[in-house]
Image: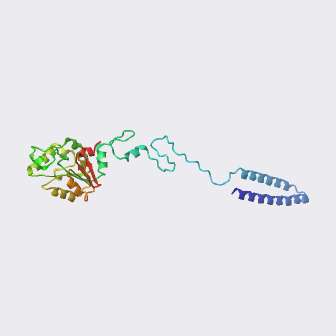
């Protein structure tokens, strides 16, 4: 661009020289000195034009200021200068896996937030009673007991589950008396009044196959059980399962294990 401008200017000067030569000859022939002032003014204009061209920087584009990358000492922001959006460390912490607390800052989630994230916002949950919610572990133990006993440690977790999911409880019982013991224990524990659980969502059957049939018909997002055989058989049909047991056992990849319900949702 600069070389082309200089070439044009040289051609212009040559034309001006030829013009001046003609006019000077005419001045001497006619002795009309008005042409002298015209030529002088024209020469001044050419000089100023030449100086303006020389002081103009080469190229027509403006130089773009260099983009300064963020300082590496600023915590919580990306060090890549090409990032369009820089995420603060608080946003990065919320995407971390729940482990009870976050570092740095020791930011803790509430139990309700942990329940929602652990269940992946599952809208329907089925759960057996014996060994998970009740202290009794077998139908025979429930039948022999004077009354059923609800684990106090699971009450808060159950309350949070019913706030975010449609919860169904189920169990195999040996007689009607055992069924009444369970309903009375749940009612005394305040489970029917503190959350969204109602008595119609507590289901009873006389066989383990009947309980497994309940689960398949309800098609929950999560099923919680303590019977390893049922957990294994339902793994093909239920998206997520939680197996409650003190013993470590191998299940399908969609089955989680924990020693207790409250431990799985531990804050």
40 left or right, relative to 182: right
- Image position of 35 (left or right of 254): right
Q: Nearer the viewer, residue 80 or 35?
A: 80
Q: Residue furthest top?
A: 105
* Quadrant holding the N terminus: bottom right
Residue at image position (11%, 44%) is 147
x 27%, y 46%: residue: 264
Percent across and percent down for residue 204 are 14, 53
Display colour scheme: rainbow
Pick the front one: 84 or 153: 153
The C terminus - image quarter: top left
Q: Is residue 131 above or below residue 218?
A: above
Visible residue check, residue 180: no
Q: How many marks?
A: 0
Q: Answer with the quarter of the image where residue 25 lies.
A: bottom right
Comparing 114 with 21, the one in front is 114
> Which residue is more in the foreground, 243 or 164?
243
Residue 86 is situated, as x and y percent measured from the top left of the image, at 46, 47
Task: Please give the name of the residue rendered at 77% of the width and 58% of the height, measured from the top-left corner.
Answer: 10
Residue 262 place in picture, x, y as percent: 25, 44
Residue 195 at x, y percent in the picture: 22, 46
Left or right of 90: which side holds 68?
Answer: right
Residue 112 seen by the camera = yes
Q: Quadrant of residue 151?
A: top left
């Amino acid at each position: 661009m600069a070389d082309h401008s200089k070439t044009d200017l040289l051609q212009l000067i040559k034309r001006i020289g030829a013009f001046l030569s003609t006019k000077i000859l005419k001045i001497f022939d006619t002795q009309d000195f008005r042409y002298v002032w015209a030529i002088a003014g024209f020469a001044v204009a050419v000089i100023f034009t030449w100086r303006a061209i020389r002081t103009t920087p080469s190229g027509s584009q403006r130089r773009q200021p260099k983009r300064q990358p963020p300082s590496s000492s600023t915590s919580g922001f990306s060090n890549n200068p090409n990032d369009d959006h820089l995420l603060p460390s608080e946003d990065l912490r919320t995407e971390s896996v729940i482990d009870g607390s976050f570092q740095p800052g020791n930011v803790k989630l509430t139990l309700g937030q942990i329940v929602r994230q652990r269940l992946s916002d599952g809208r329907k949950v089925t759960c057996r009673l014996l060994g998970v919610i009740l202290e009794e572990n077998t139908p025979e133990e429930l039948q022999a007991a004077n009354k059923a006993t609800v684990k106090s440690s699971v009450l808060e977790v159950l309350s949070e589950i019913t706030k975010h999911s449609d919860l169904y409880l189920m169990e195999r019982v040996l007689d009607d008396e055992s069924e009444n013991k369970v309903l009375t224990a749940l009612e005394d524990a305040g489970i029917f009044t503190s959350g969204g659980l109602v008595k119609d969502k507590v289901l009873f059957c006389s066989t383990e196959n009947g309980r497994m049939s309940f689960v398949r018909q309800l098609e929950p997002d999560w099923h919680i059980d303590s019977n390893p055989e049922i957990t294994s058989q339902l793994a093909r049909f239920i998206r997520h399962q939680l197996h409650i047991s003190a013993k470590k056992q191998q299940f399908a990849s969609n089955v989680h294990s924990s020693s207790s319900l409250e431990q799985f949702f531990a804050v």
